[in-house]
Image: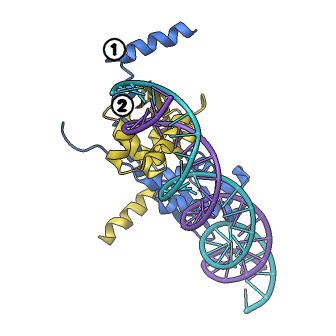
Chain colours: A yellow, B blue, C purple, D cyan
Amino acid sequence: MSGKNPDVDMTTLSALAEPNRKEIVELLRSGPLTVGEIANRLGLRQPQASKHLKVLSDSGIVEVQAEANRRIYKLRPEPFQALDSWVQSFRRVMQERFDNLDDYLRELQNKEKS
Amino acid sequence: MSGKNPDVDMTTLSALAEPNRKEIVELLRSGPLTVGEIANRLGLRQPQASKHLKVLSDSGIVEVQAEANRRIYKLRPEPFQALDSWVQSFRRVMQERFDNLDDYLRELQNKEKS
DNA sequence: TCTAAATATTCCTTGACAGGAATATTCCTC
DNA sequence: GAGGAATATTCCTGTCAAGGAATATTTAGA
């Protein structure tokens, strides 16, 4: 038909595919945080927190603001917008319309099992 | 404030975090395909294609329909819906509103650099 | 300048995982 | 039922990434 589908950076996905990093992202949803606070709230050791934050930072998910001794990390909007666009490109799949007979029959079969 | 945020299964993310698997998913966006077709179009060897499809299947991203000799794989809507909900829970981040002074000042700084 | 706090970095080890090659399994056709 | 096509599975190997521990770096303050 028309133009290309939106894409999402693999580094975004692989960064989010690590449990601790995903938790960091969830945590930062409510606002910027310091490395120490992140480590504390998630029960991580400081070096691991720093390492995970570096990965998140390298992938552009997070940005740093130096505040004297501390580094304040916050989420960046772009990766989430890109991820959103990408997922949206599957709206046809998400609609879950049963357009053809095969799907319809398989759905009937499933209902019979219950 | 109110209820909990939507969550997304880690297996969904880690399954998608592998380049070949993501390509398989992109490919299946246009419709169900056979293992052989998937392998051909993506330049994969059949066993690797099968293995990746197993991972995708285990995570619920994909489902199989046996058709005699062949196995037809197609996308399942649920993981994408879940991923969509999850990303939507970051809408505040995605809006990129500069609600506070800090952000505003940093934005000014960036503009001065150019 | 010395110290302490906050953070980043390095080195090491271990486990997970992806690819290659070979083989097993299933099903159709003759 | 023998052979071949399509797919799954197993075994092996190498790579990469995460955690632990130690150390380096930066900054504020006395």
Q: Is residue B17 above or below residue A112?
A: above
Q: Label 1 amino acid? A: Leu
In the image, A12 versus A33, the foreground residue is A33
Chain of the residue where label 2 is placed in the rendered structure: A
Residue shown at 70% from the left, 50% from the top? B41
**Residue B76 visible somewhere in the drawing:** no
Residue shown at 18% from the left, 39% from the top? B2
Question: Residue A99, position in %: x, y?
Answer: 45, 48
Identify the residue position indicated by label 2 in the image. Answer: A32
Is B93 placed left or right of A10 in the picture? Answer: left
- The secondary element bearing badge 2 is classed as loop
Is B32 placed left or right of A16 in the picture? Answer: right
- The secondary element bearing badge 1 is classed as helix
Q: Is residue B15 above or below residue A7?
A: below
Dot 2 surroundings within 10 Å: few (below 14), some, or many (20 or more)?
some
In the image, C1 versus D12, the foreground residue is C1
Question: Residue B105, position in %: x, y?
Answer: 40, 12
Say which mark, if any, is on residue B101: 1
Q: Label 2 amino acid? A: Pro
**Residue B43 visible somewhere in the drawing:** yes
